[in-house]
Image (tube, rainbow, N blue to C red):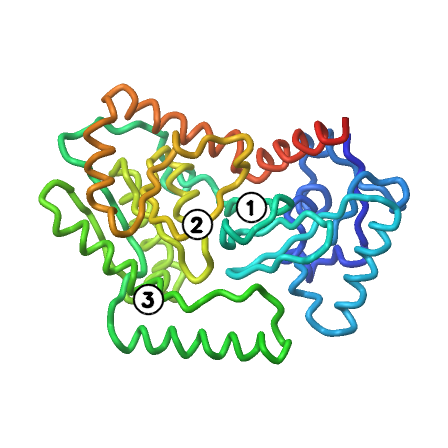
Amino acid sequence: MLKVYTEQIYLTPENRRFVFPLLFDLWYVPNTELLEKYQIVSEIADCDIAVVPIDIARYDSSKRQQKLNDFIKKASDLDKKVWLYSGGDYGKSVSTNAYTFRLGGFATLLDSQTFILPSFINDPYVILAKEFRTLDKSPQAQIGFVGHANNSFVKRIKEYLLFLNYNFKRWIGKIQTDFQPFYSSSSKRYKYLKQLEKSPEVETHFIFRDKYRAGVKTTEEKRVTRLEFFENMESHPYTFCMRGVGNFSVRFYEALAMGRIPFVVDTDFSLPLNQDINWDKHCVIVKADKMVASLIDFHQRISEEDFEIMQQNNRKLWQSHLERKAYFLKVYSLFKVARK
């Protein structure tokens, strides 16, 4: 068992959305399996791991930032491992001996003490009220996509203005995250999808949205568009995935949860549990300039049997490694081994 210390004063209803994800299952909605592996202790001297309780972005003010620094120093002085959570699209790496858990970032810039978090999602098959099934291999690669893809000049200008505004806040210290260069994800997504559509050797089923999540407002509109999203994914073996504002894709994890094959444009991203997962067996990662040819080549080379097995293994992978409880059970195993 790993003994976990955190500052419980921060574990309030107001902070529920911002807590270190493991603490959600240890404190707010206790999970029996995780409680068999992790135990919250009241004294930092008794712990194996000191967990900063909330997203470190919540420590933006100078007063709070000092509290964060004091917590890290106290744990380090006692030779305790420290876990940090940096949420949001950008995230932040802290220059300490702490382990940082974050959703994205650039693989070439992340150190060995960074843990990539999956996007923790609900099971899409519960939303669809269906059972998982594999799809047969067709002569042509069948790829689906429903989402925000807009190549208008006005859209690009809006994205750039938002980028400038965000980085001004970074510059004055109001926001503390890692810098990322400007990346017009919606226009790039549109461009790449259109390249796939033009290929006579690829069967595409794309629904382009002008706004994020189709810009819907009402509960019924959200329900309808969400069903359309997952029905498209369920009907096609390949799902086009690419980063958004942050350098990660929620759709990537949704595709795995559905037992589909993520077709991912490489943007120097990093994936979870690299030491435990051979990602080449679960997705197709391609360079943008070779995207269409890479999909055609992969589809031609994979056998019908392996095509079905890959779908089955992707569904199993999400259940065994990427669902929130499963992920932190794997993290437990990694740190348990490290203690020996």
Disc 2 versus disc 1: nearer the observer: 1
Q: Which residue does the image show at 79% across and 47% down from the upper left?
A: 50
222, 185: nearer the viewer: 185
Q: Which mark is residue 67?
A: none
Q: Secondary structure at mark 1?
A: strand
Please say if 267 is above or below 150.
above
Q: Which residue does the image show at 60% across and 36% down from the upper left?
A: 325
Task: Find residue 317 and report its horizontal and vertical position in percent.
Answer: 47, 30
Q: What is the C-alpha distance between the residues marked 2 and 1?
A: 13 Å
Q: Amino acid at mark 2?
A: Val
Q: Amino acid at mark 1?
A: Ile
Q: Do residues under tags 2 and 1 come within 8 Å of each other at their CB atoms?
A: no
Q: Secondary structure at mark 2?
A: helix
Earlier sequence position, callout 3 versus callout 2: 3
Please say if 244 is above or below 331.
below
Specify the farthest residue to the left: 200
Q: Which residue does the image show at 54% across and 30% down from the upper left?
A: 276
Task: Find residue 39 and report its horizontal and vertical position in percent.
Answer: 79, 36
Q: Left or right of 57: which side holds 103?
A: left
Q: Which mark is residue 250?
A: 2
Return the residue at label 1. 116
Q: Quadrant of the N terminus?
A: top right
146, 289: nearer the viewer: 289
Quadrant for residue 126, please give it: top left
The local crowd at label 1, few if under 14, some if 14 to 19, many if 20 or more residues have their Cα within 10 Å, is many
Q: Do residues under tags 3 and 2 come within 8 Å of each other at their CB atoms?
A: no
